[in-house]
Amino acid sequence: MNLLQSVILGAVQGVAEFLPISSSGHLVVFQSILGLGDVPVLFDILLHVATLAAVCIVYRSGIAKLFLSLVRFIGRKAGPEDEGNLRTIFALLVATACTACLGYFVNKIELDDHPRIVAGLFIVTAAILLSTLWFKGKKSLGEIGWKEGLIVGIAQGIGVFPGISRSGITISASLASGLRREDAGEFSFLLSIPAILGALVLKLGDAGDLSSAVQPLPLAMGMTVSFIVGLGSLLILRRLIKKGALAWFGLYLLPAGLAGIFLIG
């Protein structure tokens, strides 16, 4: 992989990680278009880690509050003001556990070498996003519990499939379980933190394969571009979520999926 290819994939990851159009699916399609062949999964995960840094920056205040409430809970000093944060943490733990269980089996289904199937899953994501037009939740982030965590965790497990947008399906599931738009987005992005870090830990053993396929400079540039573009995409998506505009992306994914099915060789 050369420097230009890495930068292109980094930009694709930055755009598609947060905009609900499936970053993993677009990486598979673009790797096929660029003729890269078999790229180690760890490369994709490191691009995800770069965009994860954008999540930590944008939601640093909320993350800090959750962390402080957890520390007070462990130290048996939690008060009424921590109740909502602790409920959120519990829901995140339930969702993460569901994702880990379901993702373990889903991950065994290899689709990276089947870009046409991935393109077909773009159409599935389009249908999911269009369904959000009917969801009008009223719950705040501090009012959720294990049921909401279960629903969103199952959704994120399905989102392991390339072509199914993780952000799209988890935000849609959060909306379907009753969360307000802005809270649905925040819960989805907070949930991405343990999911991406967990995937990184599982794939660290592939570091040798990665070093032989991607040199340090292209990798660093790809991650840098992924972070910068991802930060901008996340800020844009936050505004679109508040406007209830997720369905717009379905209008992109539908023709993109059809084009992928018929044009990919």
Image (tube, rainbow, N blue to C red):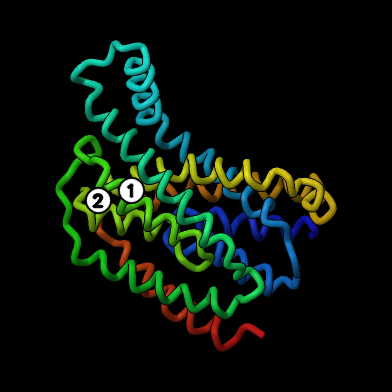
Coordinates of residue 37 in the picture (x, y in percent): 75, 69
Q: Residue at x 69, y 55 (%)?
A: 7
Mark 1 residue type:
Gly
Amino acid tagged 2: Arg
Q: Which residue is mark 2?
A: 181
Q: Which residue is mark 1?
A: 185
Circles 2, 1 touching at the beta carbon (< 8 Å)? yes
Residue 2 appears in the figure = yes
Q: Measuring from the top left, give residue 257's x and y in whole percent.
A: 48, 78
Which of the 4 quarters of the picture holds residue 135? bottom left
The part of the image, by quadrant, that contains residue 116 is bottom right
Q: Quadrant of residue 200?
A: top right
Q: Nearer the viewer, residue 262 or 40?
A: 40
Quick one: which residue is furthest to the right in this view?
212
Percent across and percent down for residue 96 are 42, 44
Q: Secondary structure at mark 1?
A: helix
Q: Residue furthest bottom?
A: 262
Q: Nearer the viewer, residue 70 or 240?
A: 70
Q: What whole-number distance in Å separates the C-alpha atoms at marks 2 and 1?
A: 6 Å
**Residue at 29 percent of width and 11 percent of height:** 77
Q: Is residue 44 found left or right of 206 in the rendered image?
A: left
Question: Residue 106 at what x, y percent from top left?
Answer: 51, 62
Q: Identify the residue shown where x is 23% and y is 30%.
A: 84
Which disc number belongs to residue 150?
Answer: none
Q: Is residue 109 above or below residue 257?
A: above
Q: Quadrant of the C terminus?
A: bottom right
